[in-house]
Amino acid sequence: MKRILAVVLVVAFAFTAFAQDYDPEKIVSAEIVDSQINVMFTFPAGMHQTLQEDLFFIDVDEVNGITFEPTIYPEGKKTEDGYIEYHGTVTLSKKFTVTSDFSGIPEITIYAGFQICLDTGTCFMPEEVEFTLPFEIEDKADSEAPKESTSKVLQFLIMAFLGGLILNVMPCVLPVLSIKAMSLVKQSQQDHKQILRNSMAYTLGILVSFIILALVIVILKTSGEMVGWGFQFQSAGFVTALLIMIFVFSLSMFDVFIIRAPGMTAATKASSKGGYSGSFFSGIFAVLLATPCTAPLLAPALGFAFSQPPAMIFGIFILIGLGLAFPFILLGFWPKAIKAIPRPGEWMNIFKEIMGFLLFLTALYLLNSLYFLVGGANLINVLLYLIILGFAVWIYGRFARPEFSKKKQWIATLIALIIAIGAGFMTLDYAEIENSAEGSGHYPRDWQKFEPELLAQFVDDGKPVFVDFGAEWCLTCKTNETAVLFTEDIEAAFKEHGVQMLRGDNTKKDDTIGEWLTKFKRAGVPLYLFYIPGQEEPEVLPELITKDMIYNLLDKLD
């Protein structure tokens, strides 16, 4: 009993001693710098703050004309129990954007909450400090500032256009572009107006797709979702739908079927003369296949766009679309260039079938991405569905041809649709696919899974670290990993220099990786970081990397 009483007295004395100097307002200080509210918490030695957003937070009263972003929490120390703790001085930040309808306020009220705990485990009552800061929007009279701002915006706009232009030579876009080139060959005997109209229809398909994509980005961004370039490829449902379209398109290259509405032969012949719808949908396919690729110059422009108001997001995306469509715009206005293309002949059928095999390879790439989204068991169901779908389009192609009666054409079409749709309901369970965790995460050989706490530990220990943020659906990432990062000589060089190798797999949506992409102003993967001991900031590599780049970085460790 005496021992228990002694412990109680010691604890009470500790609380009393701390309470004498414990002033919540001395724990917290704040400032507003560069459109960002920073609140600094200074916790005494032997004490800490646990990451609980309902107890450890900063908040601001709503102000008309100001948009506040979610609170930014720094990295903390992960305990054995899985909690995140903060010691010493910690800064929570909240960025804000001032819109055109802001009428001005003299000051702003900030609320800071925390709950101090002893390292021995005892926690004090939660505290909330309220204070005000003067709020002034600087109106710089210096004429150079607007020029620099305009110059920066113009730079990113140019990068967006050039990035879209370079997308034309990326491997994920080549299949559709090749098919479109074949279409232009067929049109080479037509008048210039027909060629121009088809080129404009192709361009329109691209622009409409990019405008829709920008609209989705704006809506999700407004709702607080963290989105990036290629985000739709993190959805198993989207990848499955795109896979189906590519697979069916591949079968059409081998004349398994020709798309025609029963009884609409005259309309089919009329549309085949101009092929505007075909050109339009070719543009849509080009965009669908382009989004998993991040071309050089495109990533910085997208990173800039995702941090801007809706109007700038639309502007950036439209310029990317114009860059992607630019070669065909040139052909539309300068049709003489088509004369360099060989005349139509039997070679075209061979070329078309080769493009069919190329599209099958594209389907294989989508299947590989789908595997890492849904796992092997669900992938078997997808493969089964593709076989049944192939049978359905064969029925359509074999029995819905113009030589059959309209009745037989309609019956064949309905049977094909029933088989295709019915099999989809039986084999494709999107809810199960989206929630499946199997297959997510790919860490070859000595690569470790990226964790901010693990990275912080390596950096604190003075170890060099290479971080690879990628995804299975990102062809640029796969090219860099296959040709550079995952090769035996580069991995041996990493080991020789004691480099810790971390990989962040963003195949499925990962909010942590999304935060790091935002931190380094990237709209999507890939992102490569190299931490050199003694340097505060990591070296940021470009989207396309070479072995020489890695060796040059390793030389800095010697």
Image: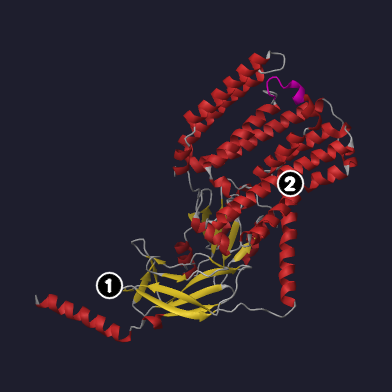
**Label 2 Cα neighbours within 10 Å, binned few <14 / some 14-19 / many ≥20:** many
Residue 98, given in percent of the width and then of the height, sits at: 60, 69
Magenta segment, which residues?
Answer: 260-268
In the image shown, does 119 or 246 lie closer to the viewer?
Answer: 246
What's the amino acid at mark 2?
Asn
Asked whether disc 1 touches disc 2, contact meaning CB atoms under 8 Å apart, the reply is no
> Can you say which quadrant of the picture contains the C terminus?
bottom right
Query: Which quadrant would the N terminus be assigned to in this image?
Result: bottom left
Query: Residue at the spot x=68%, y=27% of the render?
Result: 252
Q: Which residue is mark 1?
A: 122
Q: Earlier in the sequence, mark 1 or mark 2?
A: 1
Check disc 1: other Cα within 10 Å, few if <14, some if 14-19, many if 20+.
few
Q: Position of residue 176 (x, y in %)?
A: 71, 38
Q: Residue at x 36, y 65 (%)?
A: 79
Q: Which quadrant of the view contains residue 48?
A: bottom left
Q: Which residue is mark 2?
A: 168
Question: Which percent across, then down, holds residue 240?
Answer: 56, 37
Task: Count numbered badges in the picture.
Answer: 2
